[in-house]
Image (cartoon, rainbow, N blue to C red):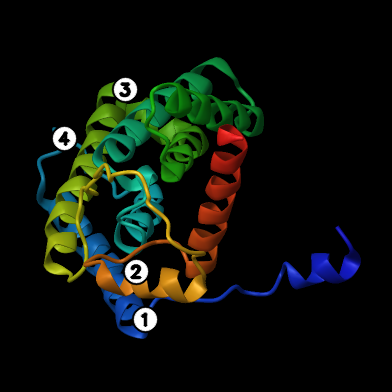
Amino acid sequence: MELKEFIASFKPGFDAIPLAEKIRSSFAVAVGILLMGWVLRFLPGAGYPLLLLASMAASAALLFVAPHSPMTQPWPLVGGHLFSALAGWGGSLLIPDPVIAGAVAVGLSVLIMYLLHCLHPSGAATALIIVLNAEQFHQHGWQWVAVTVTANALLSLLLALLINSLIPGRHYPARHTVRAPIQRNGEIGAADIEWALKQMDSVIDVSEADLLEIYQLADEHAKARHA
């Protein structure tokens, strides 16, 4: 990559998301965190308070900014946090150095999420939180960790289901439909992609440029496959 191209890569790309959608997403994130905090405050904690994990802020941003992403669907959300918590708990028990334990826990959490098809980036943050706060978590035992992480993950899921259903153009969980093979009568350009996006009744989490590049790559692959 040339220096000029490298520097240009730092510039922000074209933003196709309308301002109204940005405001709705930001408001949804704030409401989601507020409601989670309130509910956790009043849920019974069997002698200890249930914490609002910091990693849930990252989950909220994903759930209400990119609700149609594969990484924000129910199984990645819940499974990602639970299995990452397990990795963090194990790392904090087996490795005394918190820096090494944190690195191992985060790496292990990503591997587990990959293998179990529940990759959720915020899950790795949950693993690190448990390692860095091991003294507090170990004081109350693994049961508290399990209840706290489960409560946080399930509340996030319930709020995502509720709030996203109230925002126009959103379908959560995402709807996966299988379409018939494309019958092409001409070349598809950026204007065609933009028109198609306007016909859909949901917010797409990628730009027209990304979609056009995906189409071009798929088209080249199809031509090579049929050659």
Q: Residue 156 at x, y = what percent? A: 23, 49
- Give the side of residue 45 with respect to residue 108, left or right: left
Q: Marks 1 and 4: in contact by CB < 8 Å? A: no
Query: Split into 4 quadrants, where in the image is the N terminus?
Result: bottom right
Considering the numbered disc 4 on the image, is that residue within a helix, a strand or a loop?
Answer: loop
CA separation in Å, label 4 and label 2 = 55 Å
What amino acid does circle 2 point to?
Ala
Task: Pick whichever of labels 1 and 2 is earlier in the sequence.
Answer: 1
Q: Disc number at residue 196?
A: 2
- Circle on res. 18: 1
User: Label 4 belongs to which residue?
Assistant: 47
Residue shown at the point (76%, 72%) measured from the top left: 8
Which residue occupies the foreground of this view, 41 or 106?
106
Q: What element carries label 1?
A: loop
| In the foreground, 59 or 166 | 166
Callout 2: 10 Å neighbours few (<14), some, many (20+)?
Answer: few
- From the viewer's perspective, is the residue at label 4 or at label 1 nearer? 1
Which sits earlier in the primary sequence, circle 4 or circle 2? 4
* 18 is higher (above) or lower (below) than 196: below
Quote the CA–CA distance across marks 3 and 1: 44 Å
Crowding at dot 3, Cα within 10 Å, few <14 / some 14-19 / many 20+, comes out as: few
Say which amino acid is labelled 4: Gly
Q: Please tell me which residue is depicted at 43% across the width and 72% down the height of the picture.
A: 192
How many residues crowd around disc 4 within 10 Å: few (fewer than 14), some, or many (20 or more)?
Answer: few
